[in-house]
Image (cartoon, rainbow, N blue to C red):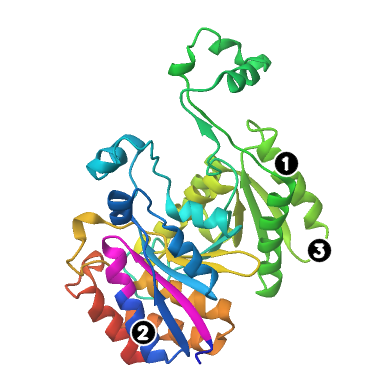
Amino acid sequence: MAKYKIAVLPGDGVGVEVTEAAMIVLKKLGLDAEYIYGDIGWEFWRKEGEPLPQRTIELLKSTDCCLFGAITSKPKDEALEELAPELADKGLVYRSPIVRLRQHFDLHTNLRPCKAYEGNPLVYKEGIDLVVFRENTEGLYGGVEWHPIPENVRAAVDSHPAAAKFADCPNEDMAVSTRIFTRKGCQRILRSAFEFAKKHGRKSVTVVEKPNVLRETSGLMVREARKMAKEYPGIKLWEANIDAMCMWLLKNPFDYDVLVSSNMFGDIISDLCAQLVGGLGFAASANIGDSFAVFEPTHGSAPKYAGMYKVNPMAMLLTVKLMLGWLGEKDMASKLDAAIAAVIAEGKVRTYDLGGTNTTLEVAQAVAERL
């Protein structure tokens, strides 16, 4: 019996290809695992009206963690247009399956390391080594929204003194998306950031919000950060507004260490950090809960490249490294990191984004050979 049971959800487009690349490396590493493939993505939305079938949720419940490729996601109206004709009038609404996975399994912590590897021609500056912690289940991605807005929601909106300017707007012309923070949600993501900094000898944690405007939600996050920082006297707490942080990261990327933010702002800042170290082809992430985790590269399904085996698999291979570390396979994770670094530094095997002509699988094979 294998030591681990790992769900594998390739998803759509290039997600299938980078997952195939990941399996080349995992096979060479010899991880004692049973890999169980499951269904997720656009194909199942079109055919079944459900991009995250219940059978996939049940599969995940029987495994230790999940390796996820990528999915196609489109706005509501476009999604409805692509449904099978027999499903068109069923009242189905598309919701991102990865967001639903995060919420269903309470994967509250999104971890996104952003490290510049030597020899990568796309890095902004060599030596950048940032880690972003993004709250993963609340905020603007919490899914509590309406259009048109119902009367009870309209009544609540109208009761706020700042809503007077919307008084003449009909309900059907108004959309509302909520930004709900809880104290528990703030504390969990802040604790993850501070504990990571403590464990890995990081010197600072910067909370990235906008409390001067979003006084109640961002304000709650900042207030909780200030209280928690007292428990970590060896770690400096810095505070930055999201807009200013985008500027300061470009100007002084070496000033920062661990960044922590809410769902939407964390999404923004982590993509900026990814570009500093070479782009989404090098951006790995982990969605971590108390007892389960889903690991995914942060890039999308890139439909225009599907089937071409053209995209850079390094984000997925770095995602595998995160998964190995979470499983407790520290030696394997270190070996994989060294192999990835060696292939990047050597520069002989590169995908198109790095100016090369190698395929997704050729890069994976080069990393496997280094192992």
Mark 2 sits on what residue?
Answer: 25
In this rendering, position of residue 170 left or right of residue 79 = right
Counting residues from the start of the chain, the first of labels 1 and 3 encountered is: 1
Quadrant of the drawing holding the C terminus: bottom left
On the rendered structure, is 263 left or right of 36? right
Q: Is residue 282 above or below residue 222?
A: below
Question: What distance separates the C-alpha of mark 2 from that of mark 1?
Answer: 43 Å
Please state which amino acid type lies under the numbered disc 3.
Pro
Residue 231's place in the image compared with 251, above or below, is: below
Q: Secondary structure at mark 1?
A: helix
- Provide the residue designation for mark 3: 233
Q: Is residue 109 above or below residue 337?
A: above
Q: How many marks?
A: 3
Q: Earlier in the sequence, mark 2 or mark 1?
A: 2
Amino acid type of the residue that numbered disc 2 sits on in the rendered structure: Val
Q: Residue 245: x and y, percent?
A: 55, 46
Q: Mark 1 or mark 3: which is in front? A: 1
Residue 56 appears at what percent x and percent y? 44, 64
Name the residue carrying label 1: 220
Numbered range of the magenta stretch: 4-19
Q: Secondary structure at mark 2?
A: helix
Q: Amino acid at mark 1?
A: Leu
Q: How far, Cα to Cα, is label 1 from label 3?
A: 21 Å
Give neighbour class at mark 2: few <14, some 14-19, many 20+ (Cα, 10 Å). Answer: many
Residue at 37 percent across and 88 percent down: it is 27
Q: Position of residue 3 (x, y in %)?
A: 54, 89
The reply to whether the C-beta atoms of the residues labelled 2 and 1 are less than 8 Å apart is: no
Residue 18 lies in the magenta-colored region: yes
